[in-house]
Image (cartoon, helix red, strand yellow):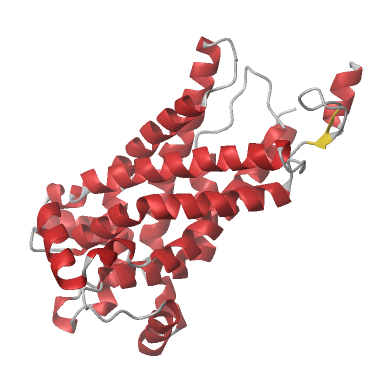
Amino acid sequence: MSKLSAQEEGGVLPKYNGIGRTMKLSSADVLLPPSKKYPFWFGGSASAMATLLTHPLDLVKVRLQSTLAPTRLSLAGMTSQVIIAEGCAGLYAGLSAALLRQFTYSTIRFGVYEDLKSRFSRDTGNSPHSTAMLISLSALSGFMGGVAGNPADIVNVRMQSDMSRPVTERRNYKHAVDGIFRILKTEGLRSLYRGVGANAVRASLMNSSQLASYDMAKVSCIKTLGLNDDTTTHLVASFLAGIVATTVCSPVDVVKTRIMGSTNGESVWQILKHSTKSEGLLWVLKGWNPSFLRLGPQTVLTLLILEQHKKLYAKMTM
């Protein structure tokens, strides 16, 4: 084994961009041999695990975004309302649909993104990807994930917002699979893809803004601030990526939520017109705080868990 290989195995690089200082490798940098790839489903698994912790924040976000009343509850107010009316278990309404969504949407967006990066690396002689290339690849993979996860997303939104509807209008899905079959039976296949355009655009925007801003923030932390490529750097970069992704996606996210929660077939234009008339232009940022509070931890947890997946898999296949 060469001297460089021994240092790399120990988790230390002798130089970074020609600077004579050491930098610890993160678990994400523990790479498999070029002939091997990480399992396609790692992204979905990591996202599902993170969802187990962040689902209550997502539920509160959906409730806030689906409320059309001009007087808005705060994050704490909506959380209290859910707990009082439904108990603590109410914060996990729709969990089965949320997990199904991650196993479809996130599996595709992470898996396709990593596969495309690998393919383009081979085509370009393993040279570093440009920012434009990373944004393009992540946007495409996000779009594909949004389409794949739309049926589960429909059920997820409906289950999370069900208790905020009048008793006579509640759907009372038992779980995600029950919701999908009941929609197919009563509304048809097309209803499972209601709002797929807005959902796919939102997924494309989220994936590109999240992954690109995360990579750029991570590089800046290492190069400019001199931080190591470790958990602290990942936390800082993920926090910044969460802010960017939430701000970029908020308008599309609100429209998507209202389309999926609707049963009267309103078009995107009708929803935009009605929302602006009744709530003013600030409706586009409705639910930003709970959206960020959910997306920030979700981003951090997903990336950290994903790195642990990769690290464990690399050790097991040595």
- List x then y, in percent, for residue 216: 58, 38
Rendered position, 39 above or below 150: above
Q: Nearer the viewer, residue 37 or 75?
A: 75
Look at the picture and state if 2 lies above or below 28: above
Numbered marks: total: 0
User: Could you say where residue 251 lies in the image, as x and y percent from the top left?
Assistant: 30, 56
The answer to whether residue 26 shows anywhere in this view is yes
Image point (13%, 47%), residue name:
190
Q: Nearer the viewer, residue 302 or 89?
A: 302
Coordinates of residue 194 in the picture (x, y in percent)? 18, 51
Snapshot quadrant of residue 218: top right
In the displayed structure, would residue 226 be above or below residue 47?
above
Residue located 42% across and 80% down the image: 79
Residue lying at the far right in this picture: please name it.
3
Residue at image location 49% in from the left, 65% down from the top? 293
Q: Quadrant of the N terminus?
A: top right
Is residue 165 left or right of 237 when viewed as pictured?
A: left
- Give percent across and percent down for residue 302: 56, 50
Q: Relative to 165, is 45 on the left or the right?
A: right
Assign the C terminus to one quadrant of the image. top right
Q: Is residue 24 left or right of residue 247?
A: right
Closest to the observer: 144 or 177? 144
